[in-house]
Image (spheres, rainbow, N blue to C red):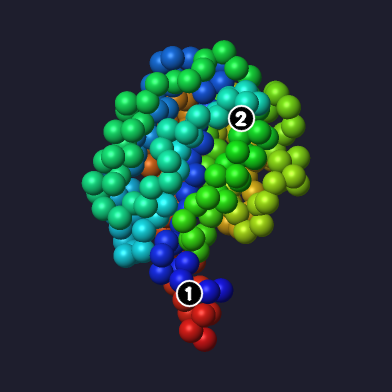
Amino acid sequence: MAAAPVEACRLALVLALDVSSSVDADEDRFQRGGLAAALLAPEVQEAFFTSPDPVALQIFEWSGKYNQTDLLNWTLIRSPADLLLAAEALNNSTRSVSDMPTAMGYALGYASIKLRSAPPCLFQTIDMAGDGVNNDGFGPSSAYKAYPFDGVTVNGLAVAAPDNTARDYYLAEVIYGPNAFLEVAYGFADFEDAMRRKLVRELSSQIIGRAQARSEAEG
């Protein structure tokens, strides 16, 4: 593995928020505001800046087959000020649609395309957040066959309320790739806490992976 991407960026991270019709206006505010608050949480900022190598961040919302809207274009997170700008972009964003179904396969395909334009990074991760199952177009398994996901990790944040349908679906169909995991929010009011836990976990795991990659390159 070449050393240059390791030095340039340790992780290209795509965050994808579900704005399909199952998410009402109040729940969308919990989700959008929860992600913004999670990015500014002390433990998340510590995880971002434990390493001198930055994280590249991109955020979009998704729902139907052709409903994906960027909320933050690729941004290298080098300082707390960069995280503040990302949080402000979320807080100032307006939901693009509210009456579309859940086309998760299309959202994953869109995320994969976004990774092609990411800065060169050691790792690539996609985070899918949502409260339901795919009900429009092809599903996650077809997306993983049709789009380039080699070496990409897809983690999930499932909103498991009022039952565990989303949790079970994300475990069986959505999470994918090296060291993929699922974080669960028990209702949208729990979204911020779940997002904080997830970000800390994946950012910390990339520090370990980066150290291993450097060791292998030097060995």
Q: Quadrant of the N terminus?
A: bottom right
User: Where residue 17 sits: x, y (%)?
Assistant: 50, 31
Looking at the picture, tell me which residue is in the foreground, 213 or 64.
64
Q: Position of 77 compared to 25: left or right?
A: left
Q: Which residue is mark 2?
A: 166
Q: Which residue is mark 1?
A: 3
Q: Residue at x 31, y 36 (%)?
A: 87
Mark 1 and mark 2: Cα distance apart in space: 39 Å
Picture quadrant where residue 66 is located: top right
In this view of the protein, can residue 161 be seen by the observer?
A: no
Residue 99 versus residue 146 in the image, above or below: above
Q: Amino acid at mark 2?
A: Ala
Q: Secondary structure at mark 2?
A: helix
Residue 189 versus residue 178 in the image, above or below: above
In this view of the protein, can residue 98 be seen by the observer?
A: yes
Q: Residues within 10 Å of mark 1 (few under 14, many from 20)?
A: few
**Callout 1 touching callout 2 (CB < 8 Å):** no
Q: Nearer the viewer, mark 1 or mark 2?
A: 1
Q: Residue at x 48, y 79 (%)?
A: 215
Q: Residue at x 75, y 46 (%)?
A: 145
Q: Secondary structure at mark 1?
A: helix
Q: Earlier in the sequence, mark 1 or mark 2?
A: 1
Q: Position of 129 compared to 37: left or right?
A: right
User: Where residue 121 sits: x, y (%)?
Assistant: 48, 61
Looking at the picture, tell me which residue is in the foreground, 209 or 169.
209
As drawn, the residue found furthest toward the bottom would be 219
